[in-house]
Each structure stands twice: as structure tokens, then as C-alpha cells.
Image (spheres, helix red, strand yellow):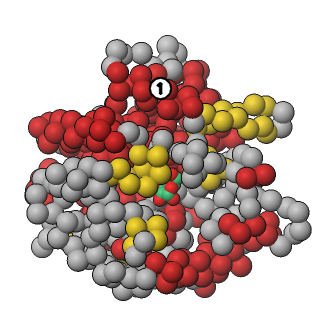
Amino acid sequence: MRADPLLELAAELLRANTREGYLAGRRHLFTVPSPHRYRFQWHWDSCFHAIVWAEIDVERAKEELRSLVARQTPAGLLPHIVYWDPRLVHRWQAPYLESSGLDWVIPGRKPRASAQMQPPVAAQALEAVVAGCANDRFLHELLPPIARHYRYLASARDPDRDGLVSIISQFESGLDFSPLYDREPGEVDPSPSRLRARARSAQALNKLCNHDPRLVFRVNPAHWEDVLVNSVYVDGLATLARLAARIGDAQLERWADTRARASLDALLDRCYDESSGLFFTLAGRREKRLAVRTIVSLIPLVVEALPPEVAGRLVEHLTDPSRFWARYPVPSVALDEPSFVPVAELRGHRCIWRGPCSLNTNWLLCRGLRRHGYHEPADALAERSRELVERGGFNEFYNPLTGEPVGARDFGWATLAAVL
Ligand code: GLC
């Protein structure tokens, strides 16, 4: 492990957040996002944990990814959440848990995994882990299940076959209560109980459909072609193509490469707004563009094949102090957006992703800045992210105006600050 006091603290936290679970007699290790609040295994958290683990202990990083794929569904989905310890699942959580409908109808049956997805970062995590492996054995083991997840998203989650993956719940976006998902996107000071009720009723409808995407797309108008999800998907496909080439899997390489190009074309075609120089998520069957300026609009920067002039416009927004370049970048909602709030609460109730910054999105943007040759803002972003953690500890979010920690403490993916 590289000598860095921050990386040592990161290792300490990830070790403390490590838990075990059993499946078919096999012991699995995973990292909980925060022992105080999130006690299961979350998909993209685990991918980010694996990226940091890879710098600390590559064998442990491999275990993180093995547990991530252990509960893959027969269709290929890698679930949003794996409930390794069902005793921690309480009935009152039912409206929030995205288990299949039956799990809550059959008495005594508890869900083992969510039936939904989260932003797919597994290919990027796999690439980070195999970079530290002496041979390709682990790549041969993990590439097939991870590739299957990307294929599943292409076949089950793109009902209009336009190349863009659709999410069927705001929780699948990874940015739960972003103002994008308000009844009128970008509401100012909405009531948190109304926001929750709305999310809950969409979840209830999904459960009634047993999370069958074909049914959900027909009966539930609450679905989105989300810019963050699709950007990390395109980046993931390009990564898959590289990994497939490394082990000579020409068929997977061709598929991933073709799909990456089609999805990027669709992002540019349908989500890019030339006049503002930003990307916007599309809502519902009518594909209404949600012109609220959130961090989601900048994430396409992570795509290596993004045309340089488009990347340049995103960097202008990112580095603008009146919009995204806060004292502590990068806020999850633009500073000049009326719905922006710097804390993780609304009217005293927890309501996340409406302004505070998070280190996983900083990681994505740093990756994008470096890929497009913007090393100076990338270094500045890395430095400020480290500062946040050095001052306030590993936290779920930070106030972008003051740097104060907000949300859950001892938070796993904040360790990314040590590897930016
Ligand atoms: C919240 C976040 C989500 C994250 C989860 C666990 O629900 O919105 O992105 O994966 O917490 O940390």
C-alpha cells in the first residue's frame, strides 16, 4: 500500500465497515456504507469501496466484487441492495425496500435482495481491481457475470430501443431526492413528506408489477432516461470492451463497443442541450427534458469518447464559481438553481441530494476531467476533496459552502478522497 496517512485512515474505516454474509455455505465479505445508517450491501457503494480496496489490499477488493455478484438474478440483474442479514430488515421499511412484491405478502418471508438496479459502476470497479492482479484469473472469473448485468440493462431496460437505459424508480438513480424527481422538477422548499409519499407510491406500483420492467413501463409513468446512469453505463461499456480485449473475448468486445457507441450517440442526440451546453435527463414515455441544473448534467464528462467541444462546455459549467465551483465542489445541485439547499435536510427532515456534495460524484468528475486533459481543475478538485475529509472525517455529504459534514458518518465511499 502506498504511504499516505489518508489512505491509512481509509483502510481503517473500510475494515471497520466490513461485514460477512453466507450464501450456499460460502462466506462473503462486503463493506457497509455506514454502520449507523446503511447496514446492507449497496451496489454502487460496493463498487466504489472495491476501487479504494484495490489500493489497500487487492485480495479484499476481489472479495468485495465476489459478494457483489453473488446475488445476481437469473435474468442478469446485479441488485441495488443485498440484504445479507435479513434480521436487520424490518417490516416498517417495506415501502422503501425494493424487494419483489411476494416477499411482503408471504408471512415470515424476508427479502434477500432488491429487485432494482443502481448506477452501474461494476465494470469500472473490476478494471481498478484487475490493475493490481498479477494474472488474468480474477478477470476471467468476474467479467462474465458483470458483462451479463450490462447486457441485461440493454435488453430489459431500454423499452424504446433508443440506446438509453431507463430507471423505474428515483432510488435507482443513486440520487434519491434530487429535485429532478419532484412533481414539478426543481421545486423550491417542497414538503419532505410529500416527496416521500410520491416516491413510495411509485415504489408500491412497481411492487404490484413484481418489478417486471415490461409491466412497469406500461403502467407506471414514473420512469426516466437518466443522464448519470447512462453516462456511467457508457463508460462501463467502454471499460468492458477494454477488459474483453485483454482476455481475447472478441464477441464481448464487439458487443460492448457497439453498444457504447449507440448509447453515447443517443445521449448526445436526445439529452444534450446545445444552447445551454448541458445534458438533461428525460422523463416518462414522452421523454420530457428536465432542465434543472444538477450534477447529473455534468457526468457525461466521464465518457472518454465525448466530443472535446461538448466536454469543454461541461467544464465551463463545472468550473464556474456561480454554478458548480463552490468553495467545496461539487454541489449536487447548481448553486444558482432555486431548489439548491446546502444541507441534507428540508424543514428539519432528511432529504438528500438537493445540494450537498458527495465524494463519489467528485470521483466521477475527476476521472472525466483527467480523461479530457483538464488536469488543473482535476487536481484542485482532488485537493479540496481531501481537505473535506481531513477536516470533517469520512462523511456521506458535505456542505459545499462551508465544508461541514452532513448526513451519515463513517461513510465508505468518502474514502475515494484518498485515490482521486
Ligand atoms: C442513499 C444514496 C445512494 C446510496 C445509498 C447507500 O440511498 O442516495 O446513492 O447508494 O444511500 O449509501
The residue closer to the viewer here, 196 or 305, is 196
| Mark 1 sits near ligand 1, with its Cβ under 8 Å away | no
Q: Residue at x 64, y 41 (%)?
A: 69
Residue 129 vs 82, above or below: the answer is above
Amino acid type of disc 1? Ala
Quadrant containing the N terminus is: top left
The residue closer to the viewer here, 286 or 244, is 286
Find residue 267 and report its horizontal and vertical position in percent: 32, 63
Element marked by disc 1: helix
* Number of other residues with Cα within 10 Å of mark 1, as a class: few under 14, some 14 to 19, many 20 or more: many
Q: Residue at x 51, y 80 (%)?
A: 193
Residue 287 vs 62, above or below: the answer is below
Q: Residue at x 26, y 49 (%)?
A: 403
Extreme residue toward the right, this view: 107
Is residue 248 at all visible to an observer of this figure? Answer: no
Residue 411 vs 268, above or below: the answer is above
Find residue 92 and report its horizontal and vertical position in percent: 71, 69
Is residue 15 at all visible to an observer of this figure? Answer: yes
Q: What residue is shown with label 1? A: 11
Find residue 378 and report its horizontal and vertical position in percent: 19, 39
The residue closer to the viewer here, 92 or 277, is 92
In the drawing, does residue 26 fall left or right of residue 418?
right
Residue 337 vs 85, above or below: the answer is below
In the drawing, does residue 85 fall left or right of residue 376?
right
Quadrant containing the C terminus is: top left
The residue closer to the viewer here, 234 or 204, is 204
Q: Residue at x 23, y 53 (%)?
A: 402
Find residue 198 and report its horizontal and vertical position in percent: 53, 82
Q: How many discs mark residues in the rendered view?
A: 1
Extreme residue toward the front, this view: 348
